[in-house]
Image: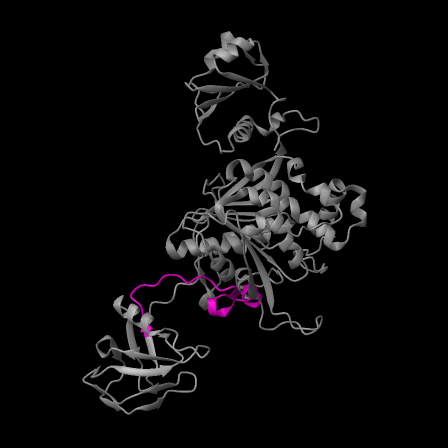
Amino acid sequence: MPTLTWIGKDKVVNHHYDVPYRVLEHKYGFRAEDGGDRTPTNSGNKIIHGDNLEALKSLLPEYEGRVKCIYIDPPYNTGNEKWVYNDNVNDPKIKKWLGEVVGKQGEDLSRHDKWLCMMYPRLKLLHKLLAEDGAIFISIDDNELANLKLLCDEIFGVNNFIDIFSWHKTYSPSNLSHKTKKCLEYILCYSKNGNAIQRFNGLYKVNEADNPLIKTTNQVKTLTFPHEAITSTMPEDFFFKAGTYGTKKNEVILHHDVQFKNGKFENDITLSSRFIWTQENLENEINKGTKIIFKGKSLAPRYDKVSYTPEVPRNLIDDEDNVGTTESGGNILAQIFNNEKRFDYPKDVSLIEYIINFLCNPDDIILDSFAGSGTTAHAVLNLNKKDGGNRKFILVEMEDYAEDITAERVRRVMRGYGAGKNATAGTGGAFDYYELGEPMFDKDKNLNEAVGEEKIREYIYYTETKRHLKRERTEASKYLLDTYHATGYYFYYERDRLTTLSIDTLHIVTERAEQYVIYADVCTLSKEDMAAKNIVFKKIPRDIKRF
């Protein structure tokens, strides 16, 4: 398999292990129905302001392997520095990070080297967060498309490549800076586990009698329509002579005379045209209850199914899929912010809705770690309103507008926006807003007790089990984290004194298990005692794992 090499790669391939684990510091909760209560909503919807590399690391204890759909719209590396969303890896934050991670070698990196160094560790953490039956979608243009494909082949696996979707982003492309007018952007898609993921669902056809059986790109076929299975919209009796009917777009040839009388055809109809079905398909559909309708005197048949299943999506996404462009995305933002805020080239909310519906159920988690103007949250809220679902969104935005654009958009979508004929009703909902807080360990690798005991407990349980600690703490079992796979995990910790695991303190074990992992400051139990009681001692903070 071809591999991608660039200057600085050796410094970043394992950098996600060195990223400091920071706790998420809750700043406020927002509820659409109550603007005054800023306590945690526990809604599962999160907006996080901070470096997305550190934020992704902070999400692992709660979300590793749980995110069904990841959509990201990272910098395209165009060199354009005029956007609100600075689409250039010469951004001061990225340059500072490269200096710290890659070192002096970073001064010699090309624009593409820098971009790849920035993307690699973020994609590694996104891969960890993705569920086994989940998929990631990455928007990109042709500046880095080829490099991104090889990067994702390496991280997600070439066998988990799904497709490159082409999105018709604009109907008025620039005529100034290119030799061709660029109408398309691309969306790379990879699954976490190609064997686990089911087929993608595209659009559900509208359940109405307006689906043409003729398509101009098809081969000509001859079909016989049983007269008892077809209806017509004609208001009066009519006699059809053999011949050609309809327009050039839906032209049909009738092979024999047919009488329509008293609201029904009196004999079968044999037609030739560019039909989408074969005779077998037609008969199968009729057997399933599909109605065949002839509208007026054109003899161009249409069909109305009793029930519809979603189609597998095309790898071209355009208005045929009811998906808008950057222009329509900009119009929505203008309505939300009353033309007060500008955000160039935003994705249309319908694009993200369409992608989420490929594989997500109504209670799945959707993550966007390059959140921008918050389109992904808007899409999740719209879908929940349409079907009563309970999808959750997690947004991460490192720029300063995370509060006044990203979060503010979500607030307005939840409450409703616009006025008069442009008014859009609110979706309802709630979210919690976070900043990146204290690191779990200080610069000397000691446990940072300022993060709080509950966060330390959650961290340790995750490092041991790769699971989120959900069990509520009780006074009777204050040191128990939880029991998992017949192992009891205990964190014997007191902030103001050293703890000693000894014969006299074994009463801290309050739940029977086959084995016990106990964290404490000191252990005076003999090896024989620990073996007899199936105890594994781990010293605080020396034996607390880093990940």
Above or below for 66 versus 339: above
Above or below for 507 versus 458: above
What residue is at 51 percent from the left and 30 percent from the top? 465
- Left or right, 2 with reference to 292: right
**What is the count of numbered marks?**
0
Residue 432 seen in the current view: no
Q: Is 468 in front, or is 271?
A: 271
Residue 310 within the segment the image draws in magenta? yes
Residue 73: image quadrant is bottom right
Above or below for 256 versus 539: below
Residue 291: image quadrant is bottom left
Q: Is 537 in front, or is 219?
A: 219
Scheme by which the image is coloured: one colour
Residue 354 seen in the current view: yes
**Residue 81, how many percent across, how many down?**
72, 58
Image quadrant holding the C terminus, namely top right
Residue 231 within the segment the image draws in magenta? no
**Residue 114, how many percent across, how many down?**
73, 50
**Residue 337, how many percent across, how many down?**
55, 60
**Where does the magenta region start and end?**
303-330
What residue is at 38 percent from the left and 77 percent from the top? 275
- Left or right, 62 with reference to 204: right
**Residue 536, how many percent across, how many down?**
53, 18
